[in-house]
Amino acid sequence: PHRLFSAGSSFNCGKIPSFATVNPATMSGKEPAIVQNLCAGAWVAPDAHEVHSVCDPLTGETFIKQPTIAENELGPFLDSMRSCKKSGLHNPIALPERYLMLGEVSQKAAQRLSEPEVESFFARLIQRVCPKSDVQALAEVHVTRQFLYNFSGDQVRFLAQSFGTPGDHPGQTSQGFRWPYGPVAIVAPFNFPLEIPALQLMGAAYMGNRVTLKPCHRVAVVMEQFLRLLHECGLPLSDVDLMTSTGPVFESFLVQGKPRMTQFTGSTKIAERLTKALDGKIKIEGGGFDWKVLGPDVPDGPLFDMQVGQCDQDAYACSGQKCSAMSILFMHDNWAKKGLIEKLDKLQSARNFKDLTIGPTLSVRPEDWKAHVASLLSIPGAKLLWGGVPINGGDHTIASVYGDMMPTAIFVPLESMMASEEAFAKCTSELFAPIYVVTQYSTKDIDWVLEALERMDEHLTAAVVSNDPQFQHKILGSSLNGTTYVGFRARTTGAPQNHWFGPAGDPRCAGIGTAEAIRYTWSGHREIITDVGVEPTDGFVMPKQS
């Protein structure tokens, strides 16, 4: 276990918090962590279902055991979900005191996450199941903590703030409310074991929904422990169900149970499948093929170096396993002349397996990334800038079922990329790994760049690296990515709690992080028109029938 954390790690303490039932430091084949499901307000005995083993990404050793719900065992979970009415666990009219209760839970949970012991616990646990650097693991805890602080106290009920409009006659008014869906489901990904499911779960709960949560089986232990923290902070055990199962079994659960809404974060392929299976009652944050355009104006000095560092982070932080990772870089000639490629190469070469600034990919196997590299290099004029090899030349202990790709970049001429549908498809095919495409353009080629942006299918994040208002206007006015950064410090990665994060261009888009995102994703509009019938002062004459 000592190899899993970088030297001098800020979270190497041995004590575990009061709510914890696992120890990240000792999880191993000899002492596997035990995960339990939560159903109808009770933790289910670990041996009540078939036990599934989860392997340590860095060694291949079994270090977690958790139940796997079979299709014929869905009954209790279906009954539990159906116990929630369509009007939710609370709404602006029924049980409004629950808004205050959840504000208090958020405050207490944020305070607990501020404790070094608890912060370290979750950072270490994240790092064990989804290997990433100390900084990246801690960032998940920090974002989650700040989000909970943001929605403490009265802020939860402010999410459900209504508005009124005068009526047509005395005694009539109309009032708009944000109304919960009631029974809902969340399918969460592996790459952010805490941040994504925690923020979506709490947003759903704030608005009055009752959640059945399915985290990715590889990392489910993180949310199981987070739920235990929430319970210690006052969240009723019956508010959320936790289910560990295979994808097909949970899809069957969704089809049978018919939740009023399902929020899915993951691959576009699965999102499309679930959309059909659930008759469109879904909000998604699917895959992200995210672009960055470096404009003709190039900064000098520190600003140039800051953007070099940002490109490296956008591409390779968390080993490229971010839905917001930079997938393609459109580099203006002026940036190339200033030595951008050489600086990027020098920076990426400092990443290493020891401190987990590069590590295993949990959804991309070695044969997958090798095939992807070969596909890109088959395009006329394409060349390998760096990478394209296994971590440490293959001399590592990474589990064989996971990928082992060193930071990689491949240059493809813009003309070649745009020459055919086949070439464009190869260049814009997302691989959840530390790799991106670099292409170069001149000012006269800007229409080609805009055409490329238009032809892409994913519209999550983007970056327009320019301080030129005219260039910004041209790119922004012809694109639609839901989270777009602009300016010399623009990035593609970044899903903090202080701004909306989510895709655009699709009516199923889900958001995360902000009050607007919570309202949009986890509630619908309900209009209530009050007409009390104030007696007219000058009498009443029955109108003619119409």
Image (spheres, grey):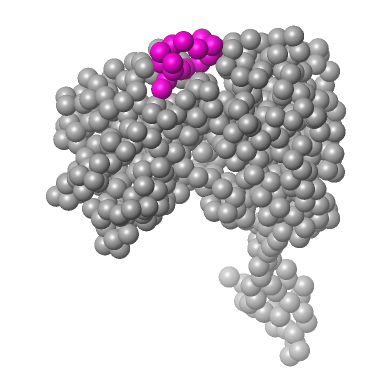
Q: Indicate the position of residue 155 as horizontal and vertical percent values.
A: 72, 59
> Main SS type for the magenta part?
loop
Depth check: 352 or 405 in front? 352
Label total for image: 0
Work out whether residue 66 can be spotted: no
Asked if 124 appears above or below 234 in the picture, the reply is: above
Depth check: 4 or 318 in front? 4
Depth check: 469 or 175 in front? 469
Residue furthest out toward the bottom: 538
Depth check: 270 or 363 in front? 363
197 sits left or right of 441 in the view: right
Quadrant for the C terminus in the image: bottom right
Q: Which residues are magenta?
A: 390-406
Asked if 135 appears above or below 392 in the picture, the reply is: below
Rendered image quadrant of residue 219: top right
Residue drawn at the location 30% of the way across and 63% of the way down: 469
Q: Indicate the position of residue 532 as horizontal and vertical percent values.
A: 77, 72
449 part of magenta stretch: no
521 sits left or right of 539 in the view: left
Residue drawn at the location 50% of the way across and 22% of the way down: 353
Q: Indicate the position of residue 371 as horizontal and vertical percent values.
A: 34, 15
Rendered image quadrant of residue 238: top right
Residue drawn at the location 22% of the way across and 19% of the way down: 378
Residue drawn at the location 47% of the way across and 25% of the way down: 352
Quadrant for the N terminus in the image: top right
Residue furthest out toward the front: 8
401 part of magenta stretch: yes
504 sits left or right of 530 in the view: left
Work out whether residue 26 can be spotted: yes
191 sits left or right of 10 in the view: left
Rendered image quadrant of residue 383: top left
